[in-house]
Image (cartoon, rainbow, N blue to C red):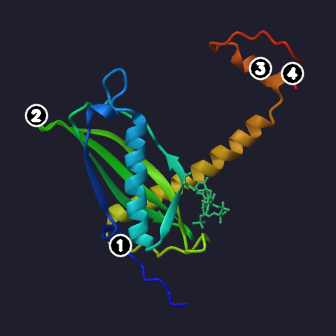
Amino acid sequence: MEALQPKSPYSSETTITELMIPSYANFGGKIHGGILLALMDKVAYACAAKHTGNYCVTVSVENVEFLQPVEVGELVSLKARVNYVGNTSLVVGIRVESENVKTGKVKHTNTSYFTMVSKNDKNETCVVPELLLEDSDGVRRFFEAIIRKYNRQQFKHEMDKAKNADLKKEISQLKNERCVIQLKDDIK
Ligand SMILES: CC(C)(COP(=O)(O)OP(=O)(O)OC[C@H]1O[C@@H](n2cnc3c(N)ncnc32)[C@H](O)[C@@H]1OP(=O)(O)O)[C@@H](O)C(=O)NCCC(=O)NCCS
């Protein structure tokens, strides 16, 4: 099989800009978070498909925090770039900005990371091209993705430990939390 050529993150960089129309709003008049998530998934797919030349699926989404509300009438731009590639997966970083066209004011609403997996026509996972890093920003993003991956593994390990924790011992840790414990069963 022919070796895949490394590709620059700039060759698959993708931006989607969309006008926030009234049907995207919630009862409070702000844009639904789900609308933004759907747009993020779309731009992540486009970027990953360009890098891999294949169909890609979303496997995980990290760092979704809506830091500022988005208003009807604003122009939302989602800029996606491949930050990291593994063997069959790749991480697409997405920066979301919202612009008030009247004032020109631009808000950074969030930066999130989508892990996508490349699939072939038989729906099998397949190897993705290496990332050609030609500037220090690219190296920094790649490095940060490795740290996030490591932290995710650590977090999973901690959660597995928490699931198997001895609740009889740990329940005292909840004494300063805002919960009222009135057990109707025995602690397992
Ligand atoms: C994504 C999917 C192919 C992974 O299958 P799998 O059996 O876990 O495959 P593998 O273990 O070989 O993992 C494939 C890659 O995904 C990565 N991966 C798997 N689970 C992951 C997770 N929770 N977070 C981040 N990466 C993950 C693995 O690290 C591996 O990356 P690498 O090849 O670069 O090292 C499979 O879970 C799937 O098809 N999910 C449905 C995806 C989908 O349909 N999404 C649309 C939204 S519904």
Residue 71's label in the rendered image is none
Does 29 sit above or below residue 181? below
Seen from the viewer's position, the closer of residues 22 and 92 is: 22
Q: Nearer the viewer, mark 4 or mark 2?
A: 2
Q: Earlier in the sequence, mark 2 or mark 1?
A: 1
Q: Residue at x 40, y 54 (%)?
A: 42
What kind of residue is marked 1? Ser
Residue 187's label in the rendered image is 4
- Mark 1 lies on residue: 8
- Mark 3 lies on residue: 171
Seen from the viewer's position, the closer of residues 59 and 113 is: 59
Q: Earlier in the sequence, mark 1 or mark 3?
A: 1
Q: Is residue 107 left or right of residue 92?
A: left
Q: Earlier in the sequence, mark 4 or mark 3?
A: 3
Confirm or reject: label 1 Cβ below 8 Å from ligand 1.
no
What kind of residue is marked 3? Ile
Q: Earlier in the sequence, mark 3 or mark 2?
A: 2
Packing grade of label 2 (10 A; few <14, some 14-19, many >=20) is few
Q: Nearer the viewer, mark 4 or mark 3?
A: 4
Secondary structure type for disc 1:
loop
Res 110 → quadrant: top left
Which corner quadrant holds the C terminus?
top right
Count the labels in the image.
4
Q: Residue at x 86, y 21 (%)?
A: 187
Residue 103's label in the rendered image is 2
Q: CA distance from mark 4 to mark 3?
A: 9 Å
Q: Nearer the viewer, mark 1 or mark 3?
A: 1
CB atoms of marks 4 and 3 within 8 Å: yes
